[in-house]
Image: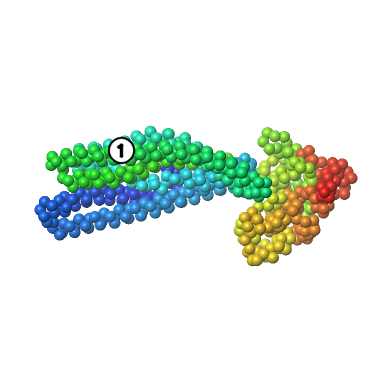
Amino acid sequence: MRGLLVLRDQVRLAPKPFGLAVGGSVLYAITTVASSAVLGWVVDNVVAPRFTEGRVASGTVIAGILAILAVGVCKSVGIVMRRLGAMTAQAQVQAVLRGRVIDKYLDLPLSFHRARPTGELLAHADGDAEAATGVLAPLPWATGILVLLVVTGGWLVATDPFLGVIGLVLLPSVLLVNVAFERRLEVPANQAQERYGDLSAVAYESIDGALVVKTLGAEGRESDRFAAKAESLREAKVELGSQQALLFQLLDALPTAGILLLLVVGAWRVDRGIITPGTLIAFVNLLRLVTWPLHMVGWVLGSLPRTVAGNDRVQGVLRQPVPPASELRLVAPPSGVGLDVRDLHFSYGAGAAVLDGVSFCIPQGCTAALVGATGAGKSTLMQILGGLLDPASGTVSAPTPVALAFQEPFVFADSAFTNISLGTDLTEADVARAARIAQADEFLDRLPRRYDSVIGERGATLSGGQRQRLALARALVRRPQLLLLDDATSSVDPSTEADILRGLSSELAATTTLIVASRPSTIALAELVLFLDGGRIAASGTHAELLVTSPGYARLVQAYEQDRVA
């Protein structure tokens, strides 16, 4: 019943192509029965008279040929309709499910993505969506086969009830076999889908971390991890395949036994003169034609557990609750204020508080540096200000739009222009201006096709500093009122970094900028320094003031200086 409910919901997503496929299947079913009836008529009226009377009327021969051709054409039309409609319906439903999963991923908070391997998320959108719709393509055929069985049963009983009973015994036999095996298939089907996700996660992690794997000589370890997951998946697939093989063998044996019984009983009926040889041949041919399609009914029923398993994993994502939109930045800050944070609290799960009453205020157009030891919560604070995390309590007043650039920027395998504009309706002048402020034009102008040059996947063709400048241009092109830089210039040399900050001051004078900084030269360029310590802003002021008034800040900056010299 779960499988039927899944199929019902999927059919509703593509009713027209599915209806076309079912119509083709019904046409195929009717012409299949008609072909056997025509064959029986040809045997009795064309073949048999030729042997018994030595001649056959030409009109009868022509009529037989035309009947066979007509049935063949109709059957071919039914096959084309069925295949075209079924494949279209399956592709359409897969596209809808994948689109819904991706849309859900975009709506879910960052915590959801952090709690799950990327490979598992990819498996939901790919392998699970494919598994969930695996039965959809053959389903119209199976539906047509049911029609075929009904029409076949009616024709058999109407032609010879005695032989018809033998043919009608096949249907409940097939259904009983499928019911017996369906529950046995569900467990290995679920295991196979889960282990496919595990395998995808390991594969993605190994490929994504290829640089680490290569440089540290960890190829053997990664191969062993992948081999273990692959072996686990193989075991589940073999178990599933073994059960399906036994099912299909039984489905093959039942119709064959029915045909043998039909031949024995039918020969006796012909010998008694109750039916004609053509009728027996039509019966045998029809059951022979039904034998293979019966496999499709069995295959659909036998594959339902895999479909249910894939659908459950997809629906598990779609059922994830989306938290209400953050109330941050719903209120604009007072005039002259660029960012106002009051009593901000945050912790990861049940862990200790990362931010414990953070409060500060930055004037509009000011460039401020956020300084703190490793693990002080600087990146967490920036993600809250950027809307990626919701605080437990506290308020933030900030202007919009807000742009956030990270220390580890993500670069798409696309053109430099698209990487900066991200497909939005921006002009070349807008992109060039942002690149100039970010000092990215210096290397972009040297590319073979300048801004139309395709950047390698994850920016493999660029240096770390170039990737950071490209990502900074992406943030600046939207002319943000609040710019958050989470150590986003750490790989840029101090001279270029100074040019970037000067460009921000002159080109985006009204933009408030908050920079997570660990480089003394960067901190010195800031108009305001915020020292984050113990989950609070322990001190604020200019760099020179804090060196005198805050011993903790002075020790940290001194450690930065020693690290730079070393």
Residue at 54% x, 45% y is 123
Q: In which quarter of the image is the N terminus?
A: top left
Q: Left or right of 364: which side holds 349?
A: left
Q: What is the quadrant of residue 112 in the picture?
A: top right
Give SS at disc 1. Answer: helix
Q: Which of 220 and 295 is in front in this view?
A: 220
Q: Left or right of 308: which side holds 405?
A: right
Relative image position of residue 473 (x, y in whole percent): 70, 58
Q: Left or right of 459: which side holds 297?
A: left
Colour logic: rainbow
| Residue 96 seen | yes
Residue at 49% x, 42% y is 310
The amino acid on which the numbered mark 1 sits, given as a three-letter code, is: Leu
Q: Residue furthest right?
A: 548
Q: Nearer the viewer, residue 276 or 271?
A: 271
Residue at 14% x, 41% y is 271
Q: Is residue 273 depicted above or below 88 in this figure?
A: above
Query: Count of labels shown?
Result: 1
Q: Nearer the viewer, residue 281 or 502?
A: 281
Dot 1: within a 10 Å radius of its alpha carbon, few (fewer than 14), some, or many (20 or more) residues?
Answer: some
| Residue 305 seen | no
Circle 1 residue: 254
Relative image position of residue 485 (x, y in whole percent): 73, 51
Relative image position of residue 451 (x, y in whole percent): 65, 64
